[in-house]
Amino acid sequence: MAAVNAPVKHTRSKDEVWLIGFPLESITGARLPSGRDVMRNFVFYYRSEKLTINASANEVFAQVMPFWEKLRIPTRQKHHVVQKIKQLYDEYSGVMKHRSRSNATDRLNQEKYTNKLDALFDISHARAEQMIKNDEDRISKTAAYGTCWINSLN
């Protein structure tokens, strides 16, 4: 009797990425993206679409920019944003190397990275506050950005 090749079961839990969550094909929503949104989108391009780190970061940049453009908040130059995305991934790789350790330092590093993921992914220009001329834009920026405007970069 010949063996029947049964399809391999593929569960959603295999797709989940440690600390980040499930890969996200596109960033949606009515708020500015968080670090977690950016990383979930990055992981989609890097792992699912098999793009390079640089190409994945460029794709994520293309998905993040419309949120900032819609609010007319001045942003950093493209290469700086791509570099920030790659740094977020590099930091993830560093935390990932020590994920099986349970000492206090490694747990603290995991917690710091998780907090960074949950915070706003800030790509605003350093002088964005001074660059916004229209009072309506300044009010909409403050409403969308919340209290993160001054304390956004850690």
Image (spheres, rainbow, N blue to C red):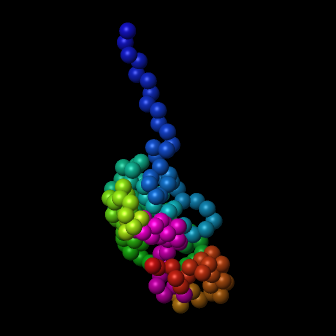
Q: Which residues are magenta?
A: 108-129
> In front here: 107 or 78?
107
Reply yes or no: does residue 128 show up in magenta. Answer: yes
Query: Which corner quadrant of the image does residue 107 belong to?
Result: bottom left
The image quarter containing residue 108 is bottom left
Q: Residue at x 53, y 67 (%)?
A: 118
Numbered label tally: 0
Q: Position of residue 140 (x, y in %)?
A: 65, 79
- Which residue: 45% across, 61% down? 39
- Location of the N terminus by quadrant is top left
x%, y% of residue 144? 63, 75
The residue located at (51%, 62%) in the rendering is 37
The answer to which image quadrant residue 103 occupies is: bottom left
Residue visible at 53% across and 72% down in the picture: 120
The correct choice, above or below, for 154 with respect to 57 in the image is below
Q: Position of residue 123 (x, y in %)?
A: 47, 75
* Residue 43 is covered by the magenta coloring: no
Residue 31 vertical position relative to residue 22 in the rendered view, above or below: below
Rendering coords of residue 72 (x, y %): 57, 77
